[in-house]
Image: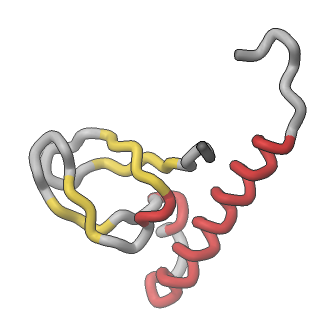
Amino acid sequence: MPNSTYFIQECPTCGRRLQIRVEYLGKRVTCQHCRGQFEAIDPASVRGDPAGQGNALLRRADELLESAAQRRLQPRSPNAR
């Protein structure tokens, strides 16, 4: 089973820090604590130009997926679990 890559986003309703899969970037999600609905946006990708936000989301998703793929390809040390 492949490992999922997550980013952290605060729920705008209750303020909880949520782990959200990168597959949900740009989509509406629901907080499992308060049931508040919001758009999944990685805060690291929003610091640029708001007009280019869609492209920034896609670039950030690609970066996160690439880093996850690289971690999976790295050999694990014998002591790692």
Question: Residue placed at 14% from the left, 52% from the top?
Answer: 13
Question: Residue placed at 10% from the left, 45% from the top?
Answer: 34
Q: Position of residue 79 (x, y in %)?
A: 81, 10
Q: Position of residue 47 (x, y in %)?
A: 51, 68
Colouring scheme applied when the structure was drawn: secondary structure
Relative to 30, is 47 above or below? below
51 and 62: which is toward the camera: 62
Question: Residue reaching furthest front?
Answer: 1
**Residue 72 vs residue 23: left or right?**
right
33 and 16: which is toward the camera: 33
43 and 18: which is toward the camera: 18
47 and 15: which is toward the camera: 15
Q: Position of residue 9 (x, y in %)?
A: 37, 50
Relative to 78, is 67 above or below? below
Indicate the quadrant containing the C terminus: top left, top right, bottom left or bottom right. top right
Question: Residue reaching furthest top?
Answer: 79
Relative to 33, is 76 above or below? above
**Residue 74 vs residue 9: left or right?**
right
Relative to 64, is 70 above or below? above
Question: Residue reaching furthest bottom?
Answer: 51
Question: Residue placed at 89% from the left, 32% from the top?
Answer: 75
Indicate the quadrant containing the N terminus: top left, top right, bottom left or bottom right. top right
**Residue 26 vs residue 61: left or right?**
left
The mark tally for this picture is 0
